[in-house]
Structure formats: structure tokens, C-alpha cells
Amino acid sequence: MSDSRPVVVIGGGLVGVCTAAYLQRAGHSVTLVDRQSARQAASLGNAGCINGSSVVPIAMPGVLWQVPGWLMQPDGPLVLRWRYLPRMVPWLMRFIAASQPARVAQQARALRALLGPALDAYQPLLDDANANDLVTRRGYLIAYSSEKGMTGDEGGMALRRDNGVQIDTMDAGALREFEPTLSNDFVGARYISETGHTSDPGALLARLTAQVVARGGRLVDAAATAIETNGAQAVAVHTDKGREAASAVVVAAGAWSAPFVQQLGDSIVFDTERGYHVEIPTPHEMPSRPVMWAEGKLFATPMNGRLRGAGTVELAGLQAPPNWRRADLLLGQLHKMFPGAVQGVKSTQSVDGARWQGFRPSTPDSLPVLGAASKVPNAFYAFGHGHVGLTAAASTGRTIAGLVCGERPSIDLSPFSIGRFR
């Protein structure tokens, strides 16, 4: 604590900002380094859900056999740009290994330990930033358009129940009463009451960032390029605008984190899932809470005066241009889910600012990378959250701040270690 240099956090998305906020609460000065264009890369465009129940890894038993069918559907939930396939082979091999039942059970337990306290971890940050109006606790629905889909999802439901998640099942009639805006085509649903959502992810990020700055944090609008070490410790972060001295460094750069891992002497199998969203402004009807269409792999979330549909996975890396057909797919799904909400909207091109594309930092086992670098003890990893970045941000920030302070973590961090990629 006598070191006057700040902790430098690389990454100004929600994970980085929550880490900075918890570091300040522990008495550290902080510097956040990120380009303005990158700060909202994933934190702005997510589905807005804070789901401590999101313990089901992407690599589930049997999912491997579903992938070819998805890839053959141009409008399916998963798209692979074939030129990118050679780059994906190491990731896909680990993905297959992660789908073994014993591994899945371990991964789910690890995710529950991190995500279960998500709303409680956010609460002091929301209080500090006067941002409680941006988070609502109404649970969410997983809706099914077929009995086959409902039966086929039982494996994921069992995994949630095994980890302490309470699930209420609704038939079609109960669903009509509970969420009357939803199409009559849905045959049933499962309701998880413990979760919450934000009505504006961008506003949440902005307000938490402003509070970090108000408490004396520095926000450096620059691209981090390198972590400087003295052979044993991280001492600075270099950017395209200069050098930032550091008492410790946190890598929370999301999809752009891999180069820093290599600089610190570690290795990782890591890639990105490109996600899309579409928004309908001033919809005619709004659901009262987030609704996931299980078969369509789409989350529909009520925002401030907008209805957002977010989802799909596209494997194409960081450089390929957006495929806006994916956004139009989401719009079509919103039409099917809420026909009364999106009347007259035929294409995302017809609505100004309605479509968005961003990058989910993705590990093959769906677990983020959390903990100290193996060779540089005052450099810490906090990235790779995939689909649960918003949910995990505050819990991650609290955990990493504790590590920087030398505290014993409250959860077992071994499943999240960088060492699993050796």
C-alpha cells in the first residue's frame, strides 16, 4: 500500500471498470487504459442480463453432433466463415474435450461459484454510482416453441438445478398469463426468478466509469501495446500515447487480451465469438422481463424505450467485416416472438442505429481466465468471459481486487487458471 504508483487496468469495459471500482474501494489508485472505440466493444451490445444461473457451458455433451446441422443452415444459430476454420482447429479440439460429462459438471460448479453472487457483487457499485435505476430484478423466461425443444433442454436444466438454481415450469396457458405479449406459438417455458437485467448496458458502463473517475481514477484514451517488466514484476504499461507506471497490472481487455498473455510468458487457446443485436425503438408492446427463445438462441430484453434482440454466434475472428444478415435474422425472430411489438419494421437497415456487432472473448471451456500470471506475480488476468461478461463483471472485479491486495480468494480459482492451457 506504500507504493504510490497506480494499478493499471487494461480494458475499459464492464469487467475492467468493475475491477477498478473494487480496487478503489480497497484503497488503491487506478488507471484505466483503453481506446474509446474499444471500451464498449462487448459491454454495450450484450443482452443486458445478469444471470447467476448461467452455469451451462457452450460445450455440452452431444453438442458436437448438432454443430454440422447448424453450420448447414445459413440462418442457423452458429455460422463459421470457412476461411477462418484453420485458425479455429486448436480451439475446436479443446471445445470437444470440454464437452465430456465430467468436465461439464466441473465447469458448471466453477461458473456457479463465480456467477451466483453477481447481483450482490454489483450492489455496492450501483449504490456508489447512483445507478440502481438501471438494474431490475424480475427474473427471466426460457420459452420453447416445441415440446421437443423443451424436452431436449432438460440436460441444461438439470445442470442448473444441481447447482442450486430454482426453476419453475409453465405450460402454455400459464405462460400466456405470465407474459401475454409473447406469441401464442410457444408451448411452454421455464422461469428463473433469481436473475436481473439492466435496462441500458451502455448507460450502466458510463455511470460506473464516471464514478471511478470521480473517485480519482484516470481514464487514458489510448491503445495498450505492451506490459513492461523488470524481469520479476510488471512495472508499466506502454500505450500508443506513452508509458503508464504501474504497481500492478490487470489484463481485462476482452477479445484483445491474448497478446498480453504472450508478453507475460503464458500461453492460451482463445478466440472470439462475433455476436449481433438488433433494437426496435418505441415498440408497440414490451415483455416485462428478458425472454430467451430456446430453439432460436435469442434473448429478447426490454430496454429503456427499446426492445433488444441479441444472440447468434459467428466464428470469423476480429478482422472480418460484419455480416448484417445476422442482424436481420434476429429481427425476424423478434417478429415471431412478439408480433405485436415490431409491426412495420421489415429490415434493420430501415431503423437508424438498430443493429450492432461485437466480439465475445471466448475460451473453449466457457470459463474466463482469472488469477495471477504464472511468471509475473503482480500481473493479473480477468478476461475470457464469453456470454457472461455482464453477469460476471462485478464478481470478477471483487475477486481480482482481492488478489491484488494479497487476500485469499473466496472461491476456488483453480478452474480459471491460465495454467490449464499448458
Image: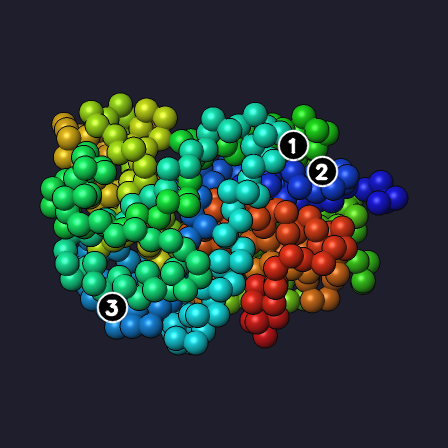
The reply to whether discs 2 and 1 touch (Cβ–Cβ < 8 Å) is yes
Residue picked out by circle 2: 24
Query: Judging from the image, what secondary structure is the residue with disc 3 in?
Result: helix
Query: Which is nearer the eye, 230 or 158?
Result: 158
Residue type at mark 3?
Answer: Gln
Q: Which label sits in the foreground, 3 or 2?
A: 2
Category of crowding for the residue at label 3, using alpha-carbon neighbours closer than 10 angstroms: few (below 14), some (14–19), many (at least 20) = few
The reply to whether discs 3 and 1 touch (Cβ–Cβ < 8 Å) is no
Spot occupied by residue 382 in the image (x, y as percentages of width and height): 59, 53
**Residue drawn at the location 18% of the way across and 43% of the way down:** 174
Mark 2 or mark 1: name the one nearer the start of the chain.
2
Query: Which is nearer the eye, 222 or 113?
Result: 113
Q: Which mark is residue 251?
A: none
Colour scheme in use: rainbow
Residue picked out by circle 3: 66
**Residue drawn at the location 26% of the way across and 34% of the way down:** 287
- The answer to which image quadrant residue 230 occupies is bottom right
Left or right relative to 237: residue 160? left
> Is residue 422 placed above or below 40 in the rendered structure?
below
Q: Which mark is residue 212?
A: 1
The answer to whether residue 242 of the structure is visible from this angle is no
Query: Judging from the image, what secondary structure is the residue with disc 2 in?
Result: helix
Spatial separation of the CA atoms under disc 3 and disc 2 = 46 Å
Spot occupied by residue 298 in the image (x, y as percentages of width and height): 28, 47
**Residue drawn at the location 79% of the way across and 48% of the way down:** 247
Category of crowding for the residue at label 2, using alpha-carbon neighbours closer than 10 angstroms: few (below 14), some (14–19), many (at least 20) = some
